[in-house]
Amino acid sequence: MEEESIKQSSRSSDTAEDEKDQCTVTVNPSHMRKAFKVMNELRSKRLLCDVVIVAETVEMEAHRVVLAACSPYFCAMFTGDMSESKAKKIEIKDVDGQTLRKLIDYIYTAEIEVTEENVQVLLPAASLLQLMDVRKNCCDFLQSQLHPTNCLGIRAFADVHACTELLQQANAYAEQHFPEVMLGEEFLSLSLDQVCSLISSDKLTVSSEEKVFEAVISWINYEKESRLEHMAKLMEHVRLPLLPRDYLVQTVEEEALIKNNNTCKDFLIEAMKYHLLPLDQRQLIKNPRTKPRTPVSLPKVMIVVGGQAPKAIRSVECYDFEEERWDQVAELPSRRCRAGVVFMAGNVYAVGGFNGSLRVRTVDVYDGVKDQWTSIASMQERRSTLGAAVLNDLLYAVGGFDGSTGLASVEAYSYKTNEWFFVAPMNTRRSSVGVGVVEGVGVLSGLLYATGGHDGPLVRKSVEVYDPGTNTWKQVADMNMCRRNAGVCAVNGLLYVVGGDDGSCNLASVEYYNPITDKWTLLPTSMSTGRSYAGVAVIHKPL
């Protein structure tokens, strides 16, 4: 009997263990929300409140335990040895009444509205009460509002309030948008040390060191009498040797602020000597002014402007590579296809083209920040199937078709003056011309190439190159094949011409031009498909 009793007891113990294993713990996700809702209702009815928080003329009744649970500031106040731990009424200094009301409302409701009007008082108040979620919301809001006109102000605000991440974001934004930032009141109001810090950055994103030089001159002239003495200190950070020689002679040397300062003249002489050296010797000169800037690459998007579908259309689409999606953006002011499209000084330009009935000379420019197209000065001539390229801050419209004949004429546009002007024409008329720019290495001036194209039924293999320094076109070696409507790009100092057609069939071959040897070479392998009117771009190789 005794043995049997022991066995039964063992079985009953096993059953209890099994039942214990089958127990589940349930969590009610709405419990805390409901509890805080009730506590807020009690607060609004002034029930069970045990403290009055005062700021300026505003008084708010609340519950110590709720404030302490959500704010380390209140927790330390109510649980420490300070007199406030037992006081019925507590005054909070350095916070205005309405802001404190919003923050106490947040403690009870987890809701707060951050706006342009309140963010500058809300963030320091949230920092004082150690409401870090609110502080982060304020920083995120300011980060979303960054713009060339306000990024320096936001950077200063972030610095004062020790918002490290926002400070870094605002500083990076100012560096990446420097050509626009330098035009604003905030830049002109910076201190000397702040300007020096900004323009000395290797991460400054500028198409040319001209922008940095122009920024220095603008800052000095803004308060010339008091700032004139700082000219040499600022010019120490302008990388004059990286400027084209023509710009040094025609602009820098002629600037009165340079002429009247011996140290600045020394910097100019250093730059001119640098240009006189052979390329291999230039690399031996290492100082902060000869070091090329290395800006951080911004996320890129691809914009597709107008086209035929099947007639000329106004639609513009944008592809975000990171988010892998297409978005419709603002439409063109008018229908446009067979246009030249380039990116220059932060904007997209749609040049000439065909509107479905006429070749046009109009030009529209797209501002991505405002998502807005505006019309600017028109070209001198109507052009469709033109070549378009940017070189030395000028937009070039090359050749094309005016509705009756191919064009040899070339004109350039300056966004600084909003004016088009003719430059030297090509030696031959070229419609459906391929245009590319081979940038100079270091301080060598870039050159613009016009490849192939046609004049009536004659498809060309000839190539011309334009030198903006001398305003002349000269013939270079012919391509191996006649091509029109080809894609063109430049890589590592070589000009590649891709596909196109020869007047009878599409081409799959690709050839490249070496300016040093003046020779065209066909790639050993062709594309799988012959193609004309193809777009060509160079991107970083995915790892």
Image: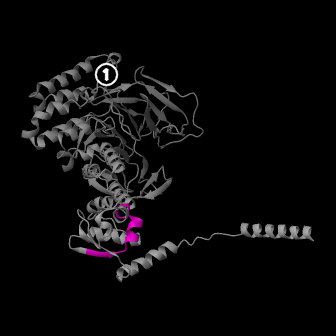
Q: How is the image coloured?
A: one colour
Total numbered badges shown on the rendered structure: 1
Which residue is depicted at the point 87% across and 67% down? 6
- The vertical placement of 318 against 289, above or below, is below
Of 340 and 194, nearer the camera is 194
95 and 297: which is toward the camera: 95
Residue 216 x %, y %: 18, 37
The residue at 46%/52% (across/down) is: 319
Residue 532 x %, y %: 50, 42
Query: Label 1: few (<14), some or many (≥20) within 10 Å?
Result: few
At a point 18% along the width and 39% down the height, the residue shown is 192
**On screen, 498 above or below 188?**
above
The C terminus sits in image quarter: top right
The magenta stretch spans residue 66: yes
Q: Which residue is mark 1?
A: 286
Residue 167 is a magenta residue? no
Between 358 and 212, the one lying in front of the other is: 212
Name of the residue lying farthest toward the left: 225
Residue 31 seen in this snapshot = yes
Q: Quick check: 449 left or right of 210?
A: right
Residue 213 at x, y = what percent?
21, 35
Secondary structure mostly seen in the magenta stretch = helix
The amino acid beneath tag 1 is: Lys
How far from the left and from the top, in percent, is residue 476? 38, 25
**Where is the N terminus found, in terms of image quarters?**
bottom right
Q: Which residues are magenta?
A: 59-74
| Residue 349 seen anywhere in this rendered image of the structure | no
SS at mark 1? loop
Compare residues 10 and 408 and report the one nearer the observer: 10
At 35% from the left and 81% from the top, the residue drawn is 44
Q: Quadrant of residue 421?
A: top left
Question: Is 104 situated above or below 247?
Answer: below
